[in-house]
Image (cartoon, grey):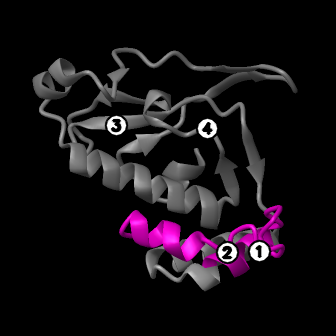
């Protein structure tokens, strides 16, 4: 609901049916297929780039508007549901919210700093953002080789 209210098109989360501290029961996503199902992607003429853009927009809204972090988002937790009205011909459906948390205001600012630092390839600022986020070892110099790692990954 939060994604739709924020105007995100082409990406959603299943409706919560029931939730406890230990279990989330979400709606069944009829007709959904795996992000890795090449035959279904072709059959439904899914535009993979537009799917990526929709997921990216949804992550920005989750982080910066809703203050929510899903620590288990990976391709296996993204389903596609055929939808001719979606920009990609399918809507991305994000599943498995068992490992999520809410950002505090300070964490949100620190995470924004981290995103900016990564986008600008600023290793020093990445270290500062890790400090702000409370990443263990950031201040102790254990991340001293971060610039070398970034360079080796061509980031």
Structural distance between the alpha carbons of marks 2 and 1? 5 Å
Structural distance between the alpha carbons of marks 4 and 3? 19 Å
Secondary structure type for disc 2 = loop
Q: Position of residue 151 (x, y in %)?
A: 42, 72
Q: Position of residue 56 (x, y in %)?
A: 42, 56
Question: Circle 2 sits on which residue?
Answer: 144
- Residue 18 in the magenta stretch? The answer is no
Which circle's residue, 1 or 3, is located before the other in the chain? 3
Structural distance between the alpha carbons of marks 4 and 2? 27 Å
Q: From the viewer's perspective, is the residue at label 3 or at label 2 nearer?
A: 2
Please give the range of residues in magenta.
126-155
Structural distance between the alpha carbons of marks 4 and 1? 28 Å
Q: From the viewer's perspective, is the residue at label 4 or at label 2 nearer?
A: 2
- Asked whether disc 3 touches disc 2, contact meaning CB atoms under 8 Å apart, the reply is no
Which circle's residue, 4 or 2, is located before the other in the chain? 4
Q: Which is nearer the eye, 116 or 9?
A: 116
Q: Which is nearer the eye, 48 or 145?
A: 145
Which circle's residue, 4 or 1, is located before the other in the chain? 4
- Asked whether disc 4 touches disc 2, contact meaning CB atoms under 8 Å apart, the reply is no
- Residue 136 in the magenta stretch? The answer is yes
- Does 46 sit above or below residue 145? above
Q: Is residue 8 visible?
A: no
- Asked whether disc 2 touches disc 1, contact meaning CB atoms under 8 Å apart, the reply is yes
């Amino acid at each position: 609901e939060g994604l739709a209210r924020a105007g995100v098109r082409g990406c959603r989360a299943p409706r919560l049916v029931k939730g406890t501290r230990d279990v989330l029961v979400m709606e069944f996503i009829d007709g959904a297929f795996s992000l890795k199902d090449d035959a279904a992607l072709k059959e439904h003429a899914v535009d993979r780039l537009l799917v990526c853009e929709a997921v990216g927009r949804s992550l920005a809204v989750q982080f910066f508007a809703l203050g929510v972090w899903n620590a288990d988002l990976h391709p296996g937790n993204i389903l596609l549901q055929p939808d001719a009205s979606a920009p990609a011909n399918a809507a991305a459906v994000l599943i498995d919210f068992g490992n999520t948390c809410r950002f505090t205001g300070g964490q949100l600012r620190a995470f924004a700093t981290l995103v900016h630092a990564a986008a600008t390839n600023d290793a020093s600022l990445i270290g500062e953002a890790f400090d702000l986020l409370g990443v263990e070892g950031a201040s102790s110099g254990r991340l001293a080789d971060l610039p070398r790692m970034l360079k080796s990954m061509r980031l």
